[in-house]
Each structure stands twice: as structure tokens, then as C-alpha cells.
Amino acid sequence: MNSIAIIDYGMGNLHSVSKAVEHVAPDASVIVTSDAEKIRAADRVILPGVGAMRDCMGEMRRLGVEELAKEVSADRPFLGICVGMQALLEHSEENDGVGCIGLFEGRVKHFGEPLEEAGVRLKVPHMGWNQVAQSVDHPLWQGVENQSRFYFVHSYYVPANCSSVVGTTQYGHSISAALAKDSMFATQFHPEKSQHSGLQLLKNFASWNGKS
């Protein structure tokens, strides 16, 4: 049976992510857990995340999630969501600078103040629906139209010049909306809150073999 583990380190939208995955993969075994052995035994792993990066990384390190993420992302499909994506970069400017897991090259930046686009002042955090341009033909985009809208909530961003970018959006800056490398895929947006397009992406993940 296809098994999908959602890592619980106390800092994620665990209920909404698990319910969305259960909806798109009704035949899968979906568990929310902090148990390292259960996570190691899963066919696919999801790292969600909300909140401040210092708190997230502090809990990941306390619970051994940082090393576990490095281990399981190397040999099976692995999905990072929102702060779970940012945590996979090398460093974040949040909280006066936080070292992150380093599975993707690059740094997480603050939007800066004032933030404007076409002469219009933009609010931070960025909260709402934005179109995502697919820059790489990846299996997780299958059935998702280019320029589909996804739901974002974040105050920090990964620049679109990140070497692993596979999807971008615009909010004052050109932003990495999705990253991919080997068996890893990560989204700045929340697929579990992004209606049809987000559910299609999660459905693709539930059957993805980890190859691009």
C-alpha cells in the first residue's frame, strides 16, 4: 500500500494537509507523525510548515527532523510546503538570520519595505492568490494548467534565480513558487488550500516515483 508520512514537529497545517492528501489519495495510508521509524518506513514524505523560521528550525533540530529530512529525501518522493520549503534552503534572513537544512542552494530573503509593484503598495505578509508560471516540465505539474492560481501566505521569499526553481510568481519581486531537485519538490504556496490546482499537485505527488 502507498504510505505517505506528514512530519509533525509542531509547526505545520497538519490537519488541512492530511485531509487534502487523504482526499486525493483515498487508497493510501496517510499518517501524521513525529516517529522517525514510521517516517523512514513511508513511501513518500511531506514536510509542512508555518510560523517563524527560528522556531521551526529549533523544533526540527530538537526532534531530529533536520537529519531525518536529509535522509528520507534522498531516496523517495519528498514534498516541502511553505515554511517547509524555505527550511530546505541554506539560510533565511528571518529572525536576524537562521541556518536551514541546505537541501536546496539559496537563501530566503525578506520582502523589504516599502514593497511596491506598478506603483501600488503591497502588503506584507503576501496573503492571497497568485498565478504561477511553470518554468520546468515536471511530473507534479501534470494536469495543472500553466499560470494556474495558488494560495500564498508568507513574509519571506526565495528569489526566482534559485538554481532549482520550477515555478515562479510575482509579488514586488520575482519569487520562486516551486523548487525541485532529484526526488524533492517544494512549494511556497499551500497546495492544500489551493482548490483544484493544489489538489491536482498533491494527487500527482501521491503517485510520483521521484523522477523528473
Image (cartoon, rainbow, N blue to C red):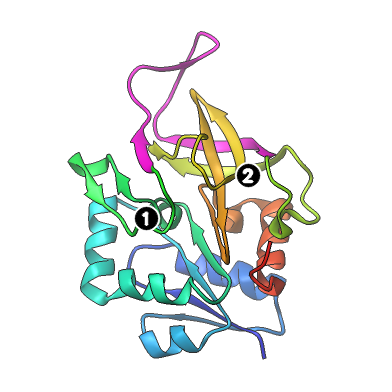
For image coordinates 73% across by 37% down, the residue present is 147
For image coordinates 78% across by 56% down, the residue present is 142
Q: Quadrant of the C terminus?
A: bottom right
Query: Dot 2 surroundings within 10 Å: few (below 14), some, or many (20 or more)?
Result: many
Circle nearer the N terminus (2, 1): 1
For image coordinates 24% across by 68% down, the residue present is 61
Q: Specify the amino acid type for callout 2.
A: Phe
In the rendered structure, find residue 87 and report the number of the disc placed on it.
Answer: 1
Please tell me whether residue 110 belongs to the stretch shown in magenta.
Answer: yes
Q: Position of residue 105 (x, y in %)?
A: 41, 48
In the rendered structure, find residue 150 and report the number of the disc placed on it.
Answer: 2
* Horizontal arrangement in the rendering, residue 164 relative to residue 87 (left or right): right
Placement of 30 over or under 60, stated as above or below: below
Q: Position of residue 114 (x, y in %)?
A: 35, 17
Placement of 70 over or under 106, stated as above or below: below
Please state which of residues 17 and 202 is positioned toward the viewer in this rendering.
202
Judging from the image, what secondary structure is the residue with disc 1 in? Answer: loop
Q: What separation in Å lies between label 2 and label 1 (alpha carbons)?
A: 20 Å
* Horizontal arrangement in the rendering, residue 169 relative to residue 54 (left or right): right
Numbered range of the magenta stretch? 107-134
The secondary structure that most of the magenta stretch takes on is: strand
